[in-house]
Image (cartoon, rainbow, N blue to C red):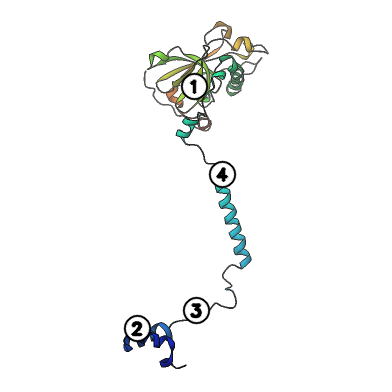
Amino acid sequence: MEANDHLALELLRKAHPPQTASTIFTEKVLHKPLHLRPTSPDPNSQDARARRRLQRLRKKEKSRRRQKPKSLSAKEKRVTGIYDVPKDLQKHHIYVPLYRMWIRYIWDILGMVKGEAHWVTAQGAGTKLTSADFHGAKVMVVRSKCVSMVGLRGIVLRDTKFTFQIITQQNELKMIPKNHTIFRIQIPQPDAVEEDPTPKLDKDLGEEEMGVNALIFELHGSSFEHRAIDRATKKFKQRNIVEL
């Protein structure tokens, strides 16, 4: 078929002037490149089996990411009350066993062993106490910018970044900020506690039943404004303490 008898050229002549139709036909039809698919695959490209495997892995990874549960936001945690303590569990005696566990935990932290002589100083124990976990500890507020909080004492239920949530012996939940607050912690000697330490450890802070050699520490809450899990690996530096 000659170019002048081409069907495309005849259709173009009906829509355009002869010269324009010839130009369009030459550029768009006669000289248009025809890309043919090669009969053999490119050796530099992946074969079909590898491509299918890669697609399966990508699809599987995408499905795994979709199945991973999304963490709750701070607002959702407040609405759902995930950290709220039910009324029937707001009893001081329920958490006394937790306090007994914490006493043994802090003995191990400070290297206190029953029947053995041990020396505990403020300089040596300060860093250990600052990085310790206080869930279950019995604390007392001795100084605070909020006067109404002075004298509060109880077992720590939650040790957050900026607050202590405690349960008092009056079965009241109290949220105490760490900043501008000094807490007192009293630790009995292992030799002063029987095998069943419930009668001794269920006393308020400052009572004589703890023993005359009980260790008493006063910690500045602003010095450990970190989560318990973060304090375990954090190195604290000495710095000046702002007076309350």
Q: CA distance from mark 2 to mark 1?
A: 85 Å
Question: Which quadrant is home to the C terminus?
Answer: top left
Q: Nearer the viewer, mark 1 or mark 3?
A: 3
Q: Quadrant of residue 238?
A: top left
Q: Return the residue at label 2.
A: 15
Amino acid type assigned to the residue bearing label 3 in the image: His
Front-lying residue, 70 or 218: 70
First in sequence: mark 1 vs mark 3:
3
Q: Nearer the viewer, mark 2 or mark 1?
A: 2
Q: Quadrant of residue 11?
A: bottom left
Q: Return the residue at label 3.
A: 35
Determine if residue 174 is in view. Answer: yes
Q: Return the residue at label 4.
A: 68
| Label of residue 165 in the image | 1
Q: Secondary structure at mark 3?
A: loop
Amino acid type assigned to the residue bearing label 1 in the image: Gln
Front-lying residue, 3 or 147: 3
Q: Secondary structure at mark 4?
A: loop
First in sequence: mark 4 vs mark 3:
3
Q: CA distance from mark 1 to mark 3?
A: 74 Å
Amino acid type assigned to the residue bearing label 4 in the image: Lys
